[in-house]
Each structure stands twice: as C-alpha cells, then as structure tokens.
Amino acid sequence: MARIVLHLTLRKHDEEKEIELSLQEPMPLLSFLESRQIPADQVGLVVRNGRWEDKNTCLIHNDDRIELFPFLQGG
Amino acid sequence: MPEIVRVNMRSGKISRENNEKYRLIGGRGLTAQILADEVDPACEPLGAKNKLILATGLFAGTTASSGSRTSVGAKSPLTNGIKEANVGGNFGWNLGRLGIKAIVVEDLPPDDHAYVLEVGEGGIKLLVRDDLKNLGTYETSRRLLEEYGKDASCLCIGPAGENKLHAACVAVSDPQGELKFAARGGMGAVMGSKGLKAVVALRTKANKVTYHNKELFATAARKYTSELANSDKIKQVNRRMGTNAIFLAVNAMGALPTRNFSQGSFEYAENLSGEKMYELICERGGEGRAGMSCMNGCAIKCSNIFPDANGKKICSTLQYENVALLGSNCGMTNLDDVARLNHVCNDLGLDAIETGAALGVAMEMGLAEFGNVESALKLLQEVYLNTPVGRMLGHGAKVTGETLGCRRIPVAKGQAFPGYDPRALKGNGVTYMTSPMGADHTAGNCFGARATVDPLGTDKQGDLSRKTQIQITTLDCLGLCMFVRPPLFAEPQLLADMVNGLFGTELTVDDIWEMGANAIRTERNFNIRAGISPAQDRLPEYLYTEPLAPTGHVFDLSEEEVLKGVVA
C-alpha cells in the first residue's frame, strides 16, 4: 500500500490528508496528480521515502510514502 | 531628497545632510556603502570607530506593500565582518515619511547613560533616559509608545544589547505595538556599545515622499499588491501559519535542525508544525491571533500571537526559524515551550536563532537537557543576571561551544546556522559559506527552489545560491519583504517601474538586480579588508564527515561548485 500525504493547499477542503493507494505496478506521480485533479504546477516539493524526487519523473511504488507540498518560501 | 542624519554619541552633535551619491542606494546596499566609505574594516566592532546604521529601503514611506523594512548595519561582533539585519515594523515607514534615508550613529558616549533618540517633524533630539536602563524590550517599547503615541515606532535593545552580548538583536514595534526583530549578527550589541537604548520615529502629518511619476509607481505597486492580496496561498498558508508553514516540509527533506544539528528530522515535528500552531491559535482564542500585518499596508499578514491554554499571549510572533532552533534543535516537543523560550529571547533582545543554537550546544554538553524547557529557561535567566554562563550563551553558539569543548558547533563565519542543515539542503550550505553575512538564511535561501534542484545533489547548488543571494539582496536594498517574491519575481519589470516612477530614472530589470549584486560585492570587499579571507568560506569539519540522518548525507560539494556561489 502506497501512502500519499497532501500538505497545505494541495488538499481540498474536505479531503483526507493521507491517501492510500494499492498499486499492482509503479504509477507516475503525474498520473496520480491528474487523477486527483491536482495541477502539477502547484506541487513544489516531492519527498519519496525521505528523499527529494523530481516530480516529473517520480514513480509511486507500493509501500512508498510520498509527501507532496505546494511551492513554499523559506523565511 | 531624503536626508542622512548623523548622531555623534560622544559630542551629542546631530547633523543632517544630503548626499547625491546615495540617492539610488537603499537598505542593505546603503548600510554596506556607508560602512565601506566611512568605517575602518579592521576596527573593533564595539569600539569608537564602528558605526551603527539604520537605513530605509528605496520604497520607504511609499504605498508599496511590505516595502518599508529597516536595515540595521554595522561591523558585527559575532562575525567580525560586515552585517546587515532587516526588520519589519513601522520604523522604516515613519522614517521614509519624515524624509530620512538613514541614521548613522557614531563614536562612543563619554558616560554610562542610556540614551533615546527622538526623531520627528519638530526635530531630532538625543535624550538621557536612565529610567529605561536594563529594561526588557517589551517594557521599553511599551513605555515609549505610551509616551509618544501608538503611531510612533520604537526601535530598541534589551539587556543583552546593553550588556554588549554578541548575539544581541534590535527590536522594532509594529502597527499593533508587537515587536519584530533585526535579529542576526549582534547589531544590538553595537547599539548597546553606543549607549543608545532606543530610537523613536514619530508619525508625521505630512508625507515627504516625492514621486517623479506617481502613476507609473502606483500602477506597478497596485498590481503586485493585488496579486498578493488575492493569492489563495497567501490567504490559506501565510496568513494562518506564517513562515512556520514550511516546518513539515523541511522535516520531510531531512534538513530540520534537531538536537544540536545531530539529526535532520524530528519525531515530534507534527507538534511544532504550522498546522498545529494555527489549530492552537484558533482553538485557544483569547489574545491569540493569526494574519496580522507587521507593516502598514502589508498584504501578506504573516504575523501571529501565540496564546497559552487560557488564551493569554505567550509570544508574538512564532515563525519557522525560531520554532526550528528553539524547538526541534533543543528537543522541545510542543509549541508552548517554544513560545516561552522565544518570549524570553525577545525580551532580552537576543537573536532567537543564535540563542537556540547556543542552547543546543549547551544541551549537548550537559548544561541543560534536550526537551526540558525549565532547564533551558534557567540558563536564559543567567543572561538576565549577566553571569559568566549567561554571557557565554549570549555571545552565541561559537563562544558557547568553544567554552564547553563541543565538537559540533553549527556556525559559519562565527554565526549560527538558521533552520536548514546544509548537509540536506546543500544550496544553503553554499550561502552560509560564500555570503558576506555568514550563516544567514535571509542572505539567500535555496529552500524555495526545490522543484528544480535536488537539495542533496552535488551540482547546480552554487548557481542557485548565487542567484538567490542577488535576488534577496536586491529586495533588501529596496526595503521589500522577501515574501513579495512570487508576483515580483514573475514580473520583475514591476520593480523597475516602481524605481523609475519614484526617481525618474530609466533603469532596466538588469540594473535592478545589479543593486543586489553591487551590495554583496561591497560587503565582500569590506570583509576581505577586515581579514575575512575567502579561505574562511568554510563550514565546520563535522559536516563533511558526519552523515545526517535520515538521508545519510554529508556536505560533499566540490570547491569548484561552492565557488560558483561567490558574487564577485
């Protein structure tokens, strides 16, 4: 089971913060975003299993934990 | 043309001058240029030859949203190099409307009095105010604002500054009377060395700001202000959580300062997050608030008041850097503890970042206990008492670490790392190393560019750091808050239009960015003459050898990559 965590503005008002996905084969992150109607250009940071990933090439595997953040600015 | 005011603390003489040379130089650029022109780089930071400069940006007093920050500059007792720390609040706005571009404080006083400089339409006066001696920043500003009115702005130091502690900062009051801080680099100690307890900038009836082409300026200002005001992200993130919105992102990347920079993520991160902070502010109510402006007319409104369980204010404002350094870096597991520590730092007039790093070092060496707020508060009481231990902590992480024999001292050029471990955000490592400011996130924070550059990668970091250093320094020269970046970096012609509308110039966008680059070059040259050679563009050795959990990375950029970050 893959877990996708949507942070801040990437989560719609009534949406769960964590989404679970059962995957038979790796799924491109961009396909996941499209399926959830999350514009890819709003995703600023992708962390897969504790490591940064390029959102354009990221593949979601079963058992992955993926955290998605919008574009944020450091203070 | 806006004037430069000079105050000689030895003679008490106050003079005003116009200098065409400085017409198009503002904020951090102006502090750098005046220091380069007038201060011997080899001087003692707390001696007679150093000067404290309070400078406004080019947009001070105008209608530009978030555009009236105040730059505080001097040779730093912490880094022994040039330093600028800028701050919101109303001080810059009031100075701009008074037609004052900068206040240059010179020499040392002949006595031990506490002085207050009163700046208003009726003139400028230096007053003896020994009744304010040793008062914390909160009481100092409360008394002065009660006296001068809530439209005035108070810039002051606390006991840390009066005691010339190297991590002392400068506090500035905002429209609500809350305090903001020019925190980094020990500018409060320089102010304390001058015997200057506070400067009060009075609100004017008339506005001396003149526009060459007001329509050009106003059109550009309205455009970016409107984009900020209508941005969903500003509304849903900045106004609720301020900069602490990034806490979980930095934790997820493994770059969060944790227990004296020994780990990059914290098991209690959710408790310290921006989401939790906003939830508690709403739940507890009372004096708690989010979405407050720290400057007149600011469209971002990222300040807050964090309340205790009874709704009573603990601290204003909780922001990411302080939560990271006083929180996870000290092992604190809840925001109440962080807010209590932050409040004490603010009242003492101590940089909360430097102090959080110093406490982390002290905890590693057994002077206090990670996660035990009472033990940390007890140490901070030593600062109030000005004991040797208090002075050690108040001089920052380097002095604390060296005194206690700690090997892991998270500093660059003598200044503590802010809230990003450079092993897991390597672009910021380049900034800490190559910026004349030392380890200062406001000098070029690479955190915001995570979609395109791998924070753990070994390439692109130098170019990224260099670019962000120039961009952010340009905003510092104009007096703009760094959170105006999205609309203005997407359309930088707006910056050129505002400058041209204000001054009647025909500057291009490239000319605007050159303001930032020039300021950095001036600072770097000052530092070289101060004895800070490029050989000191280094990080502590443990960062090159000690892997940081959870990513397991060390700082492994090549010298060639780091050198790309130098703005030469």
Image (cartoon, rainbow, N blue to C red):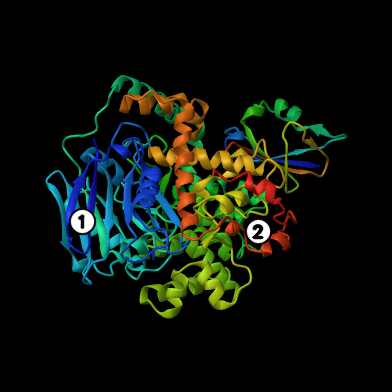
Q: Which mark is residue B233?
A: none
Q: Is mark 1 on a helix, strand or loop?
A: strand
Residue B512: x and y in percent read 44, 31
Query: Residue B508 is drawn in which quadrant?
Result: top left
Residue B333: x and y in percent read 57, 62
Residue B349: x and y in percent read 37, 62
- The residue under label 2 is which amino acid type? Glu
Density class for disc 2 (Cα within 10 Å; few <14, some 14-19, many ≥20) is: few
In the rendered picture of this protein, how many numbered marks are placed on residues? 2
- In this figure, which residue is indicated by the disc labeled 2? B267
Q: Do the residues labelled 1 and 2 touch (CB within 8 Å)?
A: no
Upstream in the sequence, badge 1 or badge 2?
Answer: 1
Quadrant location of the N terminus of chain B in the rendered image: top left
Q: Residue furthest bottom?
A: B388
Say which residue appears at 46% left-offset and 59% top-offset: B530
Circle nearer the viewer, 1 or 2: 1
- In this figure, which residue is indicated by the disc labeled 1? B117
Density class for disc 1 (Cα within 10 Å; few <14, some 14-19, many ≥20) is: many
Say whether residue B537 is left or right of residue B511.
Answer: right
Q: Give the alpha-carbon distance from disc 1 to disc 2, as whole Å.
A: 47 Å
Question: Can residue A38 be seen by looking at this rendering?
Answer: no
**Residue A45 or B202: which is nearer the viewer?**
B202
B125 up-or-down from B43: above or below: above
- The residue under label 1 is which amino acid type? Leu
Say whether residue A8 is left or right of residue A31.
Answer: left
